């Protein structure tokens, strides 16, 4: 049975992931760096050293074909897709081999732009964002199983 892996440090959908996973009896594995403390009583929690991409590498080393990964990190998503995992972001976007190259390119361009501009943080999350994520993850699970 595939697992749901979560790049959980800044994941705003942890509760939704747990709700859906419990409904479908799917195990969840959350990954954090040492600056976080987390326990939900359902998922397995792995804490890794704080360091550049340490959570990403810990996830990729355990990820198997057919597993689901929740992340907003395009680089991690690309590595997971190479392992034939399913990848979804916290807004419900399902990453594919067809869209990841464009997303990585946009990320590189945005990084260049942020160097020279004062850029604000992410927009405040809304209920419609949670609904979109919940619908996408539920659909993905139904398609897989």
Image (cartoon, rainbow, N blue to C red):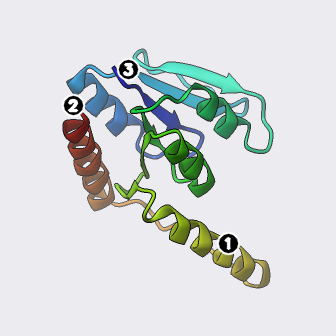
Dot 1 falls on a residue whose secondary structure is helix
Task: Say which quarter of the image contains residue 43.
Answer: top left
Q: Earlier in the sequence, mark 3 or mark 1?
A: 3
Give the quadrant of the C terminus: top left
Q: Which residue shows up at 45% across the image and 57% down it?
A: 97
Query: In the rendered image, which quarter is residue 14 located in?
Result: top left
Question: Relative to 33, is 97 on the left or the right?
Answer: left
- Residue ID at (78%, 29%): 49
Give me the C-alpha separation between circle 3 and circle 1. 34 Å
Q: Nearer the viewer, residue 24 or 87?
A: 87
Residue 145 marker: 2
Mark 3 to mark 2 CA distance (whole Å): 14 Å
Quarter of the figure that contains the N terminus:
top left
Mark number displayed over residue 108? 1
Q: Position of residue 113 (x, y in %)?
A: 70, 82
Residue lying at 21% horizontally and 26% vertically, measured from the top left: 23
The label shown at residue 27 is: 3
Q: Residues within 10 Å of mark 1 (few under 14, many from 20)?
A: few
Q: Is residue 83 left or right of residue 32?
A: left
Q: Looking at the image, is mark 3 or mark 2 earlier in the sequence?
A: 3
Q: Please name the residue shown 56% across and 52% down the image.
A: 78
Mark 2 falls on what kind of element?
loop
Q: Nearer the viewer, residue 107 or 37?
A: 107
* Element type at mark 3: loop
Q: Position of residue 86 (x, y in %)?
A: 40, 43
């Amino acid at each position: 049975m595939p697992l749901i892996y979560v790049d959980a440090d800044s994941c705003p959908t942890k509760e939704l992931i747990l709700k859906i996973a419990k409904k479908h009896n799917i195990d969840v594995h959350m990954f954090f760096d040492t600056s976080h403390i987390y326990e939900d009583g359902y998922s397995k929690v792995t804490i890794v050293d704080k360091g550049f991409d340490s959570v990403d590498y810990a996830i990729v080393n355990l990820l198997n074909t057919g597993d689901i990964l929740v992340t907003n990190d395009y680089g991690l998503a690309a590595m997971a897709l190479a392992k034939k995992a399913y990848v979804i972001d916290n807004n419900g976007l399902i990453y594919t081999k067809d869209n990841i190259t464009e997303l990585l390119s946009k990320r590189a361009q945005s990084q260049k732009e942020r160097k020279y501009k004062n850029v604000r943080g992410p927009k405040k999350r809304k209920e419609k964002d949670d609904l979109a994520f919940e619908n996408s993850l539920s659909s993905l699970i139904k398609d897989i199983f």
